[in-house]
Amino acid sequence: MPPAKKRARTYDSRKIRAAVLTQFDAVRQAVRTLTPGQLALPTRLDGWTVRDLAAHVTMAVETVSRNLAREEPAKAELTLLQWPFATAARAGDIADGTRELAEANTDLDALYTRTAERIAEALATASDTRVLAARTGAMTLADYLVTRTVELVVHTDDLNAAVPGLDIPQDRQALAAATRLLADALAAKAPGGSTEVRIPPYAVVQCVEGLRHTRGTPPNVVETDPLTWIRLATGRLAWRDALEEAKVSASGERADLGGLLPLMR
């Protein structure tokens, strides 16, 4: 018999909504403390300063309230697992829009305040099944909010990397959702059961074509922590560097994920 088709992972909408708001507020509180010198620091995003990156975080959240204000598309076009692979085409537009937003909003605290108020108001009455006309493709609100956890977790990590000692906390629910979505995206990109990828405590997926593991210790195992996984999946960390720095362990002839990463660009 053919293997049973895997069910798509489900997310608790109430927890995801809370995670998005909580993580955005954590970034907001941290941005308030940044000095002009810190805002001018470079980031690991080519050509972006900390000010640019801080402005971009509001853009990533504002898309929720802005899309809820638009006319609703007839149906969703993009599934949650398709989203990570649809973002690269918008990279140029996003970079241009980010710089324009940063230049137009010298008062970042006011920008964050407006953004927080708008998304809280928009989510108060919006249904999970409401379809949003997102740039990457029409998605349900429930799915789109899960993608916002990826944006927020990734850019929180970018800000922490750029500003020594900033240490913005990562909301546990946001980190879990981002980890799981990107792990499932790997399994969708390289379907199979020969390799087990473990990202404790949030995700375990099987992927890569080959003999399927059924019991006992898998012959091919990759294991890492959530933030390292997210950096690998989004191109912040190269696979070879992660191995050399012992940030990921990989055993077995099919445990080399270097050719599959990053998932998002």
Image (spheres, rainbow, N blue to C red):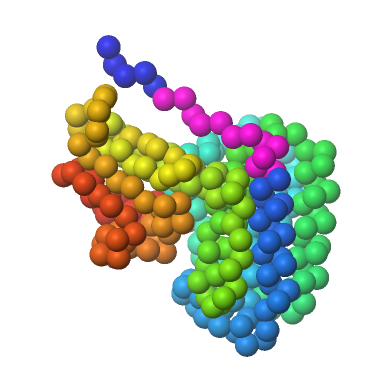
Give whichever of 204, 65 is nearer the camera: 204
Relative image position of residue 163 (x, y in whole percent): 56, 77
Give whichever of 226, 36 is nearer the camera: 226
Figure check: 104 above or below 170 = below
Which residue is rendered at x = 20% and y = 32% of the image?
210
Horizontal arrangement in the rendering, residue 173 relative to residue 117 (left or right): left
Which residue is rendered at x = 57% and y = 76% of the image?
165
- Place residue 112 in its image quadrant: bottom right
Figure check: 103 above or below 182 = below
Which residue is rendered at x = 36% and y = 18% of the image?
4
For residue 100, say whether it is visible: no
Image quadrant containing the N terminus: top left
Image quadrant containing the C terminus: bottom left
Give whichever of 53, 255 is nearer the camera: 255
Would residue 151 be counted in the magenta stretch?
Answer: no
Relative image position of residue 78 (x, y in whole percent): 54, 38
Figure check: 95 above or below 20 = below
Which residue is rendered at x = 75% and y = 42% of the image?
71
Figure check: 243 above or below 30 = above
What is the magenta range? 6-17
For residue 14, say whether it is visible: yes
Relative image position of residue 90 (x, y in whole percent): 52, 58
Question: Which residue reaches farthest top?
Answer: 1
Would residue 16 be counted in the magenta stretch?
Answer: yes
Relative image position of residue 60 (x, y in whole percent): 64, 58
